[in-house]
Amino acid sequence: MEELKEWCHLIPKIELHAHLNGSIRDSTLFELAKVLGEKGVIVFAAVEDVIMKSGRSLPECFQLFDLFHILATDHETVARIAKEAIEDFAAENVVYIELRTTPKNNESKGMTKRSYMEAVIKGLRAIETVSVYFLNTDDSTDNSIEAIPTNDIHGAKKKNIYVRLLLSIDRRETTAAAMETVDLALELKDLGVVGIDLSGNPVVGEWNTFLPALTYAKEQGLPITLHCGEVPNRKEVQSMLDICPQRIGHACFLENEEWERVKSSKIPVEICLTSNLRTQRLESIDRHHFADLYKAKHPMVLCTDDPGLFSTSVSNEYYLAASTFGLSKGELIDLAQNAIEFVFASDGVKKALTDIIQAAKRELQQ
Ligand SMILES: CNc1ncnc2c1ncn2[C@@H]1O[C@H](COP(=O)(O)O)[C@@H](O)[C@H]1O
Ligand SMILES: [Zn+2]
């Protein structure tokens, strides 16, 4: 068991579904809560209880996000959590990540959606312990771009990681706010923004509110990934599939007819095992739709969703998949490799990632 865990840690991995504010280190969260507690903004003891709770219902998760957003509202903190999140992913041999976050307006802090994103980018630039490649200046026809050095998988040398950003539209937002996010994504393309996500409390908001912004993103050539079927809502799932998103996340409550559509159009699914288990989207992990999709060779990728919130890591998600569904080491590394095909970065990056995983395969098999 320990050996399998070690293998899951060592192999180069690709993370395509992680929310920035769901990736805050526990130690940082406590530190921030303590400071705000001392200032009298929050009651630290009450917050401590919420943070420490292990099983959380989906509504409780969204209460916690409201708290996270109180803790992490100023630019400096946003930069810090972005920096730390990437350091943590790189430390476990994630070589490519699409980190998603909701750009936020916060007048009292002088924050606009744009300045929020600038803080995230500032955090990426501040990373020194890891080599971060996040500029999206690569031409998709140029295979020679930014070929990052292959990681020394045994960890002696500095790690390398490609970072790309997805801007999330929160389901609480208005059409105008969602449009603003898409415009911002277009403006920040050269700074590593590669797509749009729709997330937030799945029982809040109406599909028609987000549709104009998502359609606009599509028209502008920005790839889209949608939190789809996190709660039963057949009509919305169908509308989501109608716009042909490049990927979907979760897909916990799909009826057979919708699964047929997902499968026949080969829409890649971002699988978040721990998140689904912890938010009680299923009774037990062995009942997860991963098993069916894996058997059908459907494109999918193992992701954390919120590694901080759910105390997990990408390595742990691989371990969980292997130990629950009996995957071999070779199958695990193939899962990571297959995910390259549906990342939103350029062909040059895809080629570089293929080389990295191939090299690791050779080294680990020796
Ligand atoms: C548990 N499953 C989930 N379902 C839906 N949305 C989720 C989510 N987990 C996270 N988010 C979305 O990501 C935000 C936090 O990161 P950012 O502030 O954007 O960096 C949450 O407020 C929510 O909108
Ligand atoms: Zn999510």
Image (spheres, rainbow, N blue to C red):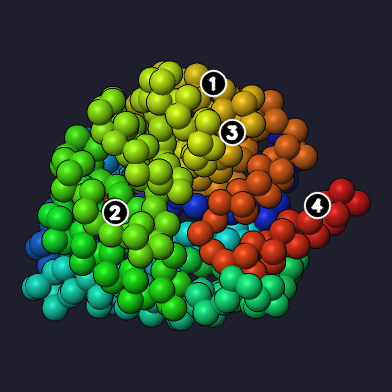
* In this rendering, the label closer to the viewer, 2 or 1: 2
Tag 4 residue: 361
Badge 3 is on which residue? 298
Q: Earlier in the sequence, mark 3 or mark 1?
A: 1
Callout 3 amino acid: His
Instruction: Identify the element where label 3 is drawn.
Output: loop
> Residue 115's spot in the image, x, y percent?
25, 77
Quadrant of res 49? top left
Dividing the picture into quarters, in which one does residue 322 lie? top right
Residue 243 vs residue 103, the one in the foreground = 243
For mark 1, what is the residue? 286
Q: Nearer the viewer, residue 358 or 64?
A: 358
Relative height, residue 135 to residue 304 (above, below): below
Residue drawn 80% across the image and 60% down it: 359
Residue 10's spot in the image, x, y percent?
Answer: 70, 53
Distance (Cα) linking label 4 and label 3: 22 Å
Disc with the residue nearer the chain's start (4 vs 3): 3
Cα distance in 3D space between marks 3 and 1:
18 Å
Are discs 4 and 3 less than 8 Å apart at CB? no
Q: Assess whether mark 4 and mark 2 are in contact (beta carbons under 8 angstroms).
A: no
Disc 2 or disc 3, which is closer to the eye?
2
Q: Mark 2 or mark 1: which comes first in sequence?
A: 2
Q: Which residue is mark 2?
A: 215
